[in-house]
Amino acid sequence: MSIAAPISSTHSSAVSRFLVAEAHQGELLGRRRCEVAAYIPRGRALFWQDENQRQNIEIRQGVVRAVRLLENGNRQILAFFWPGDTIRPAQASCQHYTAEAVTPCSIVRSNAADEFCSDHTSCGAHQVLEEMLSLSPMMGRKNSFACVAWFLLRVQPHLPRDPKRAHALQLLIPRADIADHLGTSMETVCRALAEFKTRGLIDLPTRKTIRFIDEKALARIEEG
């Protein structure tokens, strides 16, 4: 009659760690299987307003705008999403805006968790609300040139460098989009950019590039 040897605590701990590691690896593999990479051409919609969109969409490359279509046919750009941002589903049954690719985009779609909002992550509606809350004071109490200065300083950290021009950045957002985001006209945006260039605050080597020269002066314009 054989007697089984008792299992040591060290062996038991090692087995537990192995099982935890296996479970974690299985969870990661499951997540990867649920991830789908995609290329989105410029101008294409990632999803539409009022669509039942239940996925997380991670922006790997490019810029996406959140567009709300108004009853009068006009559009309001609520926010922009940049590389590293994740567009999350709304708690409501459908999204309240259309997500469109401003530039060609590389994205990764993945299944969202059951709880869209928590202390660490915001749902899709809250993401846009946070952006609108930062924009509202500018639109309510400051002139259009101040709004344009605010916008330039806000997007500056997200703009990629222009490989062909020293110290220049690629201005990825079209002037029409800037106008629709700030609630002004494209002509006003163009006049503001021309004025900033004349005053030596920025340079515009091409229509799609910008060079920041005097950020402190832009900040003073933003402050009114």
Image: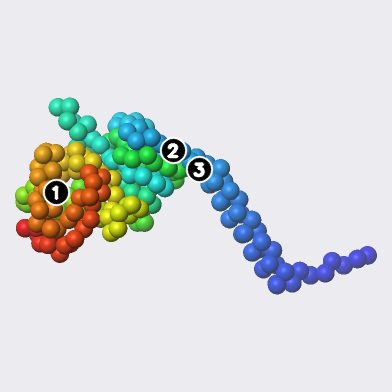
Q: Amino acid at mark 2?
A: Tyr
Q: Residue at 9% of width from left, 42% of height from top? A: 188
Q: Amino acid at mark 3?
A: Glu
- Residue visible at 35% across and 53% down in the picture: 163
Q: Position of residue 100 (x, y in %)?
A: 32, 36
Mark-to-mark CA distance, 2 and 1: 32 Å
Q: Quadrant of residue 189?
A: top left
User: In the figure, 186 relative to 195: above or below?
Assistant: above
Q: Position of residue 161 (x, y in %)?
A: 33, 54
Separation (CA) of disc 3 from disc 1? 41 Å
| Dot 1 amino acid type | Leu
Q: Nearer the viewer, residue 18 or 8?
A: 18
Identity of the residue drawn at 29% across and 32% down? 49
- CA distance for labels 2 and 3: 14 Å
Q: Which mark is residue 87?
A: none
Which image quadrant: the N terminus? bottom right
Which of marks 1 and 2 precedes in the sequence? 2
Q: Which residue is mark 2?
A: 39
Quarter of the rendering containing residue 109 = top left
- Judging from the image, what secondary structure is the residue with disc 2 in? strand
Badge 1 is on which residue?
193
The circle on residue 35 is: 3
Contact, CB < 8 Å: mark 2 with mark 1?
no
The C terminus - image quarter: bottom left
Q: Is residue 182 visible?
A: yes
First-in-chain label (3 vs 1):
3
Where residue 36 sits: x, y (%)? 50, 40
